[in-house]
Image (cartoon, helix red, strand yellow):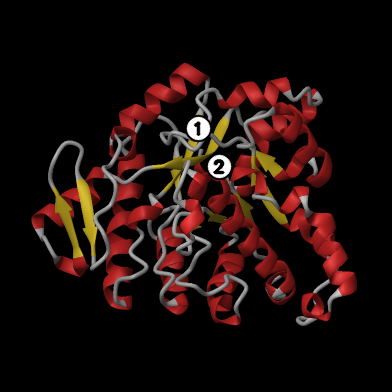
Amino acid sequence: MSAGVVDVHLHFLAPDAIDAVRRHPGRHGVRVLDGEPPRLQIGDAEPTRPLLRGLHVLDAHLDFFRAQGIDTGVFGPLMDVAGYDLPAADGAAWCRTQNEALAAALRSAPGAHQGLATLPLQDPVRAAEELRVAVKDFGLRGAMVDPHALGRALGHRAFDPLWMAAAELDAPVVLHPYALEAVERFGAHYLHNLVGYPFETTLAAGSLVLGGTFDRVPGATVVLVHGGGFLPYHVGRFDRAYTARPEARAEAAGPPSSYLRRFHYDSLVQRPEALAYLVGVVGADRVMLGSDHPFWLGDPEPLRVVRDARLSPDAERLVLGDNAARVFHLRDAT
């Protein structure tokens, strides 16, 4: 039986998390800067951008689903407010507040929508523990993390406790970029998002492959947004480096292209030709529908690019929902 249409790339900060900060301003280093729309102050960082309505009003997502014919959402957190710069204990407590609030909001919503945890990446051991609590106690289906983890590559062995916990729980980890290096040329024409975000995804994926994470933790499930960044389209360059440069073989990993199917990918590539290529390279069983609602560069009609890609009926059904049901264990929730 088909799972229906499932969107796996969404962002939502549950209002209860914001209200918890309002009740206890400054606790765990987080404050609400009231206004319309509100912003958050996370530690000593610059205040967040204003929170779009869809980021904290669940009905905005549900209206989008109804308009687009989406049956189920897998809601990720808002990476702006993850709090990686907070002290480890504060960061873990703030993640707990977000995760508990997200789980409660989705339980009370109509439908069978599911959520992804925020994790305190500044302490990989705490991140692993929070993932266990989020999955086992709150019923969240995995996690979403920023691949720019305080300047450390996600393939660094320091993150192995997190990947081992994810494998043990069979909990997918979605890599979603937000923080970037300070590159002056990103500043104009929105290039920080157009180029910087796919760059970060590619850098993290390359780190996981060449750093040996998938060999050390073969059960880890990783989802790459924005169609996998540049990886599927330049994997030949990775393979050439593997042949020509000893640095690319330092951790004794295999040829990079042999790991393409170790990842899952969302469909957010904006063009049907690109999606058809992605499916052809990684397989229809590795691609899932993603809209990035409610952000500006999300796809306002996410099903259109899938249907215009002229996939086979079986491949289209996998991309639109069946893969997501398998990867995120959605049928377990029914």
Q: Nearer the viewer, mark 1 or mark 2?
A: 1
In the picture, measured across the screen, residue 206 lies left or right of residue 154, that is right
Frontmost residue, 234 versus 315: 234
Name the amino acid type tagged 2.
Leu
Number of the label disc, if any, that sits on residue 21: none
- Circle 1 SS class: strand
Q: Answer yes or no: is residue 142 visible.
A: no
Residue at point 69%, 21% (across, down): 307
Can you give x and y, in whole percent of width and height, for residue 42 in the image?
25, 62
Q: Residue at x 61, y 52 (%)?
A: 223
Q: Quadrant of the N terminus?
A: top right
Provide residue 274's location: percent of width, then percent of height. Answer: 73, 34
Q: Which mark is residue 72?
A: 1
Circle 1 packing at 10 Å, graded few (<14), some (14-19), many (20+), is: many
* Residue 101 locus on image (x, y percent): 28, 50
Q: Residue at x 46, y 24 (%)?
A: 65
Q: Nearest the camera: 238 or 182?
A: 182
Name the outermost residue toward the top: 67
- The numbered mark, 1 or 2, whose residue comes first in the sequence reads 1
Report the residue marked by disc 2.
Answer: 330
